[in-house]
Image (spheres, helix red, strand yellow):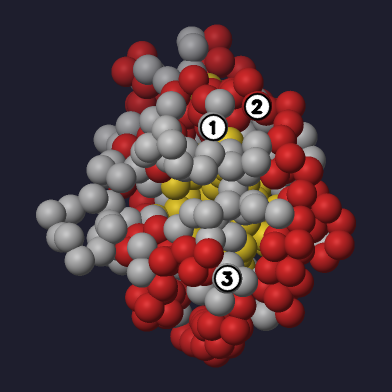
């Protein structure tokens, strides 16, 4: 349920309304936009008398909504959310490129790539320390050592770091990580999402391989319901019957999510197809479609990468792409 408040609302009356709602088991989320102030009601709103609330002097209108996600709903929060990552902002017109290797392999490899992507304009460095792999015999990442190397690259370049968490028990290792990534396989790991909701770190939440947009937003809701509002959504392709690419990038997800939610939306064109030659056109398409950013895999020697070399750009190719994205981004459909 959404309560649209009148301009210059009396603070005491508003506080009384919020306290009354809390007494009947309804949580409230106050959102002050540029042109309106909205009170979102979260819980079993069937117990709320709409006519009673409408009669209040401070209320302009009351509307029931059908979507199960409340915190992530644009109706509750009309203005775009801007996630601030230590001064690097995503959302609300702030566009960022996250770049780096699929897996952290060595200090030399990571620092070399970090310096290259920074020169090309990236402000966030991605790198997998813990790697979820389909085969138990594949490279699983350097784990704790990988995070230590990411922190070294951060100290050297000043780039904010983004890396994936696999289990809530690893949270202490992520204390100095700037953005915690939840991968596609963990999008519906609800216990992990609950734990991340109790942190204050930005969370990059990837869409699952076969999940709907509603399910993605409900996963974001798990994090936000715990109190952490710093969620960035990521479209990374879904599994379809097409075999020419690893996954199928759902470009329509960008404008649709823009309608449904106030959260920032980025796109991962690398995992979407698994083919480096398709990263550039899909990056450009995603930017024009209105994405708030991109997350792109870059490797200094893709042919010998320990993980996903086929979808990784060289630093030179990334530099070319970053320039093209920068040129077209002002003309995106936002």
Q: Residues within 10 Å of mark 2 (few under 14, many from 20)?
A: few
Q: Marks 1 and 2, Cα distance to the nearest angstrom?
A: 7 Å
Q: Marks 3 and 1, Cα distance to the nearest angstrom?
A: 26 Å
Question: Is 71 left, or right, of 212 in this rendering?
Answer: right
Q: Residues within 10 Å of mark 1 (few under 14, many from 20)?
A: some
Quadrant, the C terminus? bottom left
Q: Quadrant of residue 138?
A: top left
Residue occupying image coordinates x 77% and y 49%: 149
Residue occupying image coordinates x 37% and y 38%: 134
Q: Is residue 274 above or below residue 231?
A: below
* Whether label 3 touches label 1, CB < 8 Å: no
* Whether label 2 touches label 3, CB < 8 Å: no
Label 2's element? helix
Extreme-left residue of the structure? 241
Q: Residues within 10 Å of mark 3 (few under 14, many from 20)?
A: some
Q: Quadrant of residue 286?
A: bottom left
- Residue on which disc 1 sits: 166
Label 1's element? loop
Look at discs 2 and 3 and give the one toward the viewer: 3
What x and y, as percent, mark residue 265?
47, 58
Whether residue 152 appears in this view of the structure is yes
Quadrant, the N terminus? top left
What x and y, as percent, mark residue 65?
31, 37
Q: Is residue 28 above or below residue 215?
A: above
What x and y, as percent, mark residue 327?
55, 89
Q: Marks 2 and 3, Cα distance to the nearest angstrom?
A: 30 Å
- For marks 3 and 1, the one nearer the N-term is 1
* Whether label 1 touches label 2, CB < 8 Å: yes
Image mark for residue 170: 2
- Residue on which disc 3 sits: 301
- For marks 2 and 3, the one nearer the N-term is 2
């Amino acid at each position: 349920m959404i309560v649209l408040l009148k301009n210059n609302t009396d603070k005491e009356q508003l506080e009384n309304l919020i306290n009354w709602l809390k007494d009947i088991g309804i949580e409230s989320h106050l959102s002050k936009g540029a042109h309106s102030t909205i009170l979102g009601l979260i819980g079993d709103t069937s117990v709320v008398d709409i006519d009673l609330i409408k009669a209040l002097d401070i209320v302009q209108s009351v509307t029931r909504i059908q979507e199960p996600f409340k915190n992530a709903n644009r109706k509750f929060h009309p203005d775009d959310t801007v996630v601030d990552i230590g001064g690097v902002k995503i959302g609300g017109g702030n566009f960022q490129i996250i770049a780096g290797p699929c897996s952290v392999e060595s200090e030399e490899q990571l620092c070399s790539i970090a310096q290259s992507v920074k020169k090309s304009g990236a402000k966030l460095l991605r790198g997998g320390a813990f790697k979820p792999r389909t085969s138990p015999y594949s490279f699983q990442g350097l784990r704790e050592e990988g995070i230590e190397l990411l922190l070294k690259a951060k100290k050297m370049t000043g780039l904010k770091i983004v890396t994936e968490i696999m289990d809530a028990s690893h949270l202490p290792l992520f204390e100095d990580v700037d953005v915690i990534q939840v991968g596609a396989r963990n999008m519906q790991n609800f216990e992990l999402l609950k734990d991340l909701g109790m942190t204050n770190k930005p969370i990059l939440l990837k869409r699952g391989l076969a999940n709907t947009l509603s399910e993605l937003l409900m996963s974001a809701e798990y994090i936000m319901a715990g109190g952490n509002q710093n969620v960035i959504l990521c479209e990374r392709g879904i599994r379809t019957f097409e075999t020419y690419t690893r996954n199928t990038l759902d470009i329509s997800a960008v404008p649709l999510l823009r309608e449904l939610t106030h959260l920032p939306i980025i796109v991962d064109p690398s995992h979407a197809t698994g083919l480096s030659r398709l990263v550039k056109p899909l990056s450009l398409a995603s930017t024009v479609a209105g994405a708030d950013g991109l997350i792109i895999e870059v490797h200094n020697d893709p042919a010998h990468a320990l993980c996903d070399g086929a979808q990784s750009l060289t630093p030179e190719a990334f530099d070319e792409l970053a320039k093209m994205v920068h040129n077209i981004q002002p003309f995106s459909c936002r």
